[in-house]
Image (spheres, helix red, strand yellow):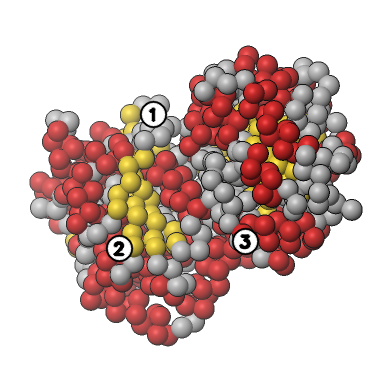
Amino acid sequence: MTTATPAKGRFGIYGGQYVPETLVANLHALERAYESAQHDDAFQFEVERTLRDFVGRATPLYLAEQLSADYGGRVFLKREDLTHTGAHKINNAVGQALLAKRLGKSRIVAETGAGQHGVATAAACARLGLECIVYMGALDCERQRPNVERMKLLGATVVPCEAGRRNLKVAINEAIRDWISNPDSTHYLIGSVVGPHPYPTIVRDFQSVIGREARQQFIEREGKLPDAVIACVGGGSNAMGIFAGFVRDEVELHGVEAGGRGDDHAAPLNSGTPGVLHGAMQYLLQDDDGQILNTHSIAAGLDYPGVGPEHSFLKDAGRATYHVVDDEEALAAFKELSRREGVIPAVESSHALAYAKRLLQQRPGLSVIVNLSGRGDKDLPSLIERGLL
Amino acid sequence: MSIEELEKAFATDRKALMPFLMSGHPTPESFARNLREAAEYADVIEVGVPFSDPLADGPVIQAAAAQALSHRTTLRSTLEVLTARDDGPPVVLMLSVNQVLAYGVAKFAASAKQAKVSGAIVPDLPFEESAQVREAFAHEQIALIPMLAPTTSDERKRAILGKARGFAYLISVAGVTGTRDSYPPETLAYIRSARELSPVPVCVGFGISKPQHIEQLRQSADGFIVGSALIRGIDEARSVADILKPLRRACDTALTGNRS
């Protein structure tokens, strides 16, 4: 089993570069810049130094003792919520911002769902003196208001997107349209393992620090490998990041998609079919005519009809399994972790926690790592307003 | 209709005018009527098939697509309208690669042929990803219209144009569809260089909205695609004839700089 990027940016049949002609030159330039950066010790040193001193890595691997007792196993949390800006998104944002500098770009556009990628990108840009424009669905601006304020404070321009369901999908559409209109000055700093090649590879590589650390930390502590690794999957960057550390081991990989409410969900790996969205072949929620379907999740960061091409490949290959957790189950886990461990998780990460509970109920005694991809402060105003807490 | 007929549409001493209409916009009935009306002024008609998430389109065409989708316009219903169409200028479709894949590549080519469609423009299918589709199209004598952008390197231009059939679609400036005031001088140079390399006619789109645009670019190009300006005019309840007449006139008087 290898997930190394094959020629032409494909993971099996998934991935590729389905973009308007105007962007092809940019993608080729990005491919070349990334390749040379990978072999440049100074660049790698700069990334490592930034992750340590700015992001605050390594993040702890925390044994949640009370939750372990409640659930009937050993539950470890990879504490990405403790990074600067509060979610794993910063790992990729600082890496790509350095790459953008290397490409000679002065302007960054990004999309954001929960706002975590937007905040991380705004922070990375502030530090490097790059202009930053963040596209965000208007609905997400409402339900993740604290993050909108944080982005503005960090000097970014936040552009609310009013089309469709006013969520992550339309934010990506607008970010790509901006990039098409400003190909010379601008780098599109995509926040997940989606989009055209080489993005799924670049974002996975920058996020793979999660898996590398977690593997080493678990072995140092337990003297063995975990039985399973669990992560939520929207586009799938936190999941790809932690999976990357264990994909060559005999460790179960569980991805958790958003079940939303009944028929209205965001679970393409469970209910979708292969197709092309935002530049890549992947599992998609689409109708017979090839139109992309609307999605719903309580978690803005999971509210997306597509999923990274590498996850699509891992599913078909049987190397990872993908489950569904709905809004209600995720909220229950959100409250449980807050009360039992004193840690308020992002509603996105709560989907992974909820699945950990289910897994340990079915198979007690397992040792699992849950990627706690972000912290939940951002979710409080909206959840309180809707009377959900 | 076939690739030959499409190529023949350019073999005149005038510049080709290629209006763009969105299937199902503003309603399926008006679309069918507009299609007939446009036939009087057009050398080729481009018919957009509405898609939920078009990446290369500006606000005007996005809104038209959303409106068409609200009337349940599909690729299938579009092909039905085109099949029932009277004789007229060649039609090329514009749609997203996911619509072609969802329909089935070979099946799409066969159905398009049956609907008297001469070619298709698939803006999110760049050259490197297009082999399978191009082969299926060639099998049915349908042209896969290649697109060039100002960011396309000369090396890529040569590779893309080397396989071109029908005509080449030149994106005038980096950006999404929508009208522009005027074109910078480098646009002219870019169109000229593409035309020199091209074995097929080159047509310019993105931003063509006024006779002055055609006059500015006519020495360099073989045809002009008018999209957002026509859609916006239809949205403002103007007639297709009223919108196309002055553009037709600009193309007819653009007699200099023809291909030899």
Q: Nearer the viewer, mark 3 or mark 2?
A: 3
* Residue type at the position of mark 3: Glu
How far apart, in angstroms, are the residues tagged by discs 3 and 2? 39 Å
Is disc 3 in contact with disc 2, using a CB cutoff of under 8 Å? no
Name the residue carrying label 2.
A90
Image coordinates for residue A213, horizontal then vertical, percent = 31, 71
Q: Residue at x 58, y 34 (%)?
A: B229
Name the residue carrying label 3.
B186
User: Disc 3 on helix, strand or loop?
Assistant: helix
Image coordinates for residue A94, horizontal then vertical, percent = 33, 68
Image-based side of A100 in relation to A280, left or right: left
Q: Residues within 10 Å of mark 3 (few under 14, many from 20)?
A: few
Read off the chain for label 2.
A
- Pick the quarter of the image with the N terminus of chain B: top right
Q: Residue at x 46, y 83 (%)?
A: A40
Q: Is residue A285 visible?
A: no
* Residue type at the position of mark 1: Asp
Indicate the quadrant where residue B243 lies. Answer: top right
Q: Residue at x 39, y 56 (%)?
A: A109
Image coordinates for residue A181, horizontal then vertical, percent = 50, 53
How far apart, in angstroms, are the residues tagged by discs 2 and 1? 30 Å
Return the residue nearer the eye: A101 or A70. Answer: A101
Q: Is residue A340 above or below residue B74?
A: below
Is disc 2 in contact with disc 1, using a CB cutoff of under 8 Å? no
Read off the chain for label 3.
B
How far apart, in angstroms, are the residues tagged by discs 3 and 1? 49 Å
Q: Is residue B179 visible?
A: yes
Q: Closer to the N terminus: mark 2 or mark 1?
A: 2
User: Disc 2 on helix, strand or loop?
Assistant: helix
